[in-house]
Image (cartoon, rainbow, N blue to C red):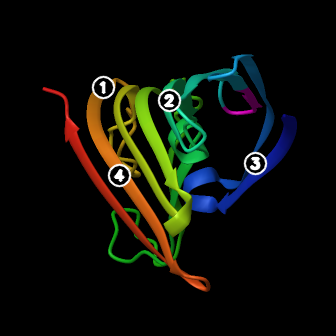
Amino acid sequence: VSGASYRRDLAQSVTYFDGVQTNDLYRLFGNAEWRPLSFLLVNAGGMFEREDANEDAFSPRFALNFLLSEQQSIRLVYSTAVRSPDMLEQEPNYSLTLDNLTDNYLGVDSSTYFVTLSPGNRHLSHEHIVSREIGYYFRYDPSDLEVDAKIYRDTMRHLISSPITLESYLVRSDTEMDIEGAELQLKWRPWSDGFVWMTLAHVAPVA
């Protein structure tokens, strides 16, 4: 499986971008599946991203699916992903216009003042996440019951934690966070035209 996509982000603001600003994003992605053994499925894939405002990024994904039976399996997944800084985070062009001023030291009743802040490209890094997952899937056909459970650990780096305001000239992507958690999903169809769906999740920071 493979594909491509194109997206254009457009923002219009005199205050934050001094007019109109655009960012074009191109993506190529693909995934391959291989069955070397009757009980083993191997999946490998990735996505390449190129855009105007940020550096190129590649996000791979790799998974092993062990088929315990026709109705249940265990999976091991390793994947990475990025979040690109948006235009306001990466390339703002601030300006503030004040009209109709009175009682000022210049002695004018009506005028326009500009306070301009143009930090240019801040060279922020992509927010980067590495995820490791162990999952279990089970299906019971007579009652159309599905169980999907997983435990995971996510490592996040270069997070942008600074506030994005007109006063925030310095914005950094230097925050780190690790989290781990567990999720459980149950799906049951007790009648032909409806089903019951329940999900449970627990997330905690890693000390």
Q: Say what secondary structure mark 2 lies in.
A: strand
Q: Nearer the N terminus, badge 1 or badge 2?
A: 2
- Compare residues 128 and 198 and report the one nearer the observer: 198
Observer able to see residue 91:
yes
Q: Report which residue position mark 2 lands on.
A: 75
Q: In the drawing, what numbered circle is on residue 22? A: 3
Q: Say what secondary structure mark 1 lies in.
A: strand
Q: CA distance from mark 1 to mark 3?
A: 29 Å
Q: CA distance from mark 3 to mark 4?
A: 41 Å
Q: CA distance from mark 3 to mark 2?
A: 41 Å
Q: Say what secondary structure mark 4 lies in.
A: strand
> What amino acid is labelled 4 in the image?
Leu
Q: CA distance from mark 1 to mark 4?
A: 27 Å
Q: Report which residue position mark 4 lands on.
A: 184
The nearer-to-camera label among 3 and 4 is: 4
The nearer-to-camera label among 1 and 2 is: 2
Image quadrant for the N terminus?
top right
Label 2 crowd (10 A; few <14 / some 14-19 / many >=20)? some
> What amino acid is labelled 2 in the image?
Arg
Q: Nearer the N terminus, badge 3 or badge 2?
A: 3
Q: Is residue 169 magenta?
A: no
Residue 185 image offset from top left, x and y in percent = 40, 56
Q: In the rendered structure, which segment of residues is drawn in magenta?
A: 47-53
Q: Nearer the N terminus, badge 4 or badge 2?
A: 2
Q: Say what secondary structure mark 3 lies in.
A: strand
Q: Toward which corner of the image does residue 123 lie, by quadrant? A: top right
